[in-house]
Image (cartoon, grey):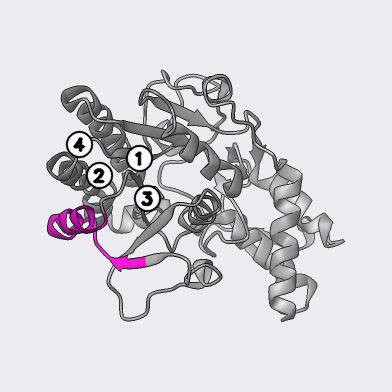
Amino acid sequence: MPTAIITGITGQDGSYLAELLLKKEYRVIGVARRSSTVNYERIEHIVDDITVVQGDLQDQGSLLSLLEEYKPSEVYNLAAQSFVPTSWNQPALTGDVTALGVTRMLEAIRFVNPKIRFYQASSSEMFGKVLEVPQNEDTPFYPRSPYGVAKVYGHWITVNYRESFDMFATSGILFNHESPRRGMEFVTRKISNAVAGIKLGKTKELRLGNLEAQRDWGFAGDYVEAMWLMLQQDHPDNYVIGTGETHSVREFCEIAFSHADLDYKDFVVMDEKFYRPAEVDLLISDPSKARAALKWEPAVSFKELVTIMVDSDLARLKR
């Protein structure tokens, strides 16, 4: 039975990845930061099948101890300060966790067992002010937030350790991936939750920022399979993961509200408070390398994703 460590196990991606690895008969070790109130909501249905341990990307010693005790064959680094707006309010923390945390994990792997296969969760936010459309593995980075900058560091330090120490260190450059497990602070979940609230008479309006911002949105459950496939290859590499389609926030609203027999124009209010200091207007992936090398294809369409999220929030609020 192979053993995998997942940092960020309590997050959206961590929960879907844990489910996938359990189906593949892995022993799953989930890492969560010490907290007086750890939120197991996303993994409560599998918490008896995995081992959740304390660890922190800001603490080198805890990472060394984890690797020495559990002896994993694979490490998936999904932990980060991942909410872009927060990265402007807490730029130093974002850099320490999202950037330097990757170095600490790589150093721990190099020290304990350099044969461990490592996956780094990179992000399409690294492309930022895009220099070409669509974006692939060779597109230059131009990050537009402290989060994006930190992710660029994490990406390049992964490549650096791969080339310097012959480690199996792979970087997955994932475009936006959503699900009913997405945090409420993210715009997609904010929309689906508001639609459910308005439909059930609990909310009267939805305040959003730039409705014209365009993203390449897919289903998180599809994307974790790509993560696993990357670590099953003969050689480590970088892979862009996305749908190759782009949709605006406005279009997300249109589909979400219409699915509940509502017109988004009656409820959505544009609020400058939610605009980014430096906007990322258009992100769209070129996932052709992943499709060819990994034989990976997204299974859930954009419209299906939106309706799944709305249905989930409707059912939750009704309960």
Q: Amino acid at mark 4?
A: Pro
Q: CA distance from mark 4 to mark 3?
A: 15 Å
Query: Left or right: 126 with respect to 309?
Result: left
**Label 4 to label 1, Cα distance in Å?**
15 Å
How far apart are the two marked residues, 3 and 2, measured between alpha carbons?
Answer: 17 Å
Q: Residue at x 36, y 67 (%)?
A: 52
Q: Earlier in the sequence, mark 4 or mark 3?
A: 3
* Circle 4/circle 3 CB separation < 8 Å: no
Q: Nearer the viewer, residue 33 or 198?
A: 33
Q: Which mark is residue 290?
A: none
Residue at mark 2: 102
How far apart are the alpha carbons under marks 4 and 2?
Answer: 15 Å
Q: Is residue 103 above or below residue 129?
A: below
Task: Answer above or below: position of 235 versus 18.
Answer: above
Residue at 38% across, 66% down: 51
What is the distance, in whole Å, between disc 2 and disc 1 at their CAs?
Answer: 8 Å
Residue 262 occupies quadrant = bottom right
- Within the magenta stretch, is there residue 60? yes
Toward the viewer: 131 or 278? Answer: 131
Instruction: State how far apart marks 3 and 1 are (Cα).
Output: 14 Å
Mark 4: few, some, or many residues within 10 Å (few <14, many ≥20)? some
Residue wearing tag 1: 120
N-terminal of the pair, mark 3 or mark 1, is: 3
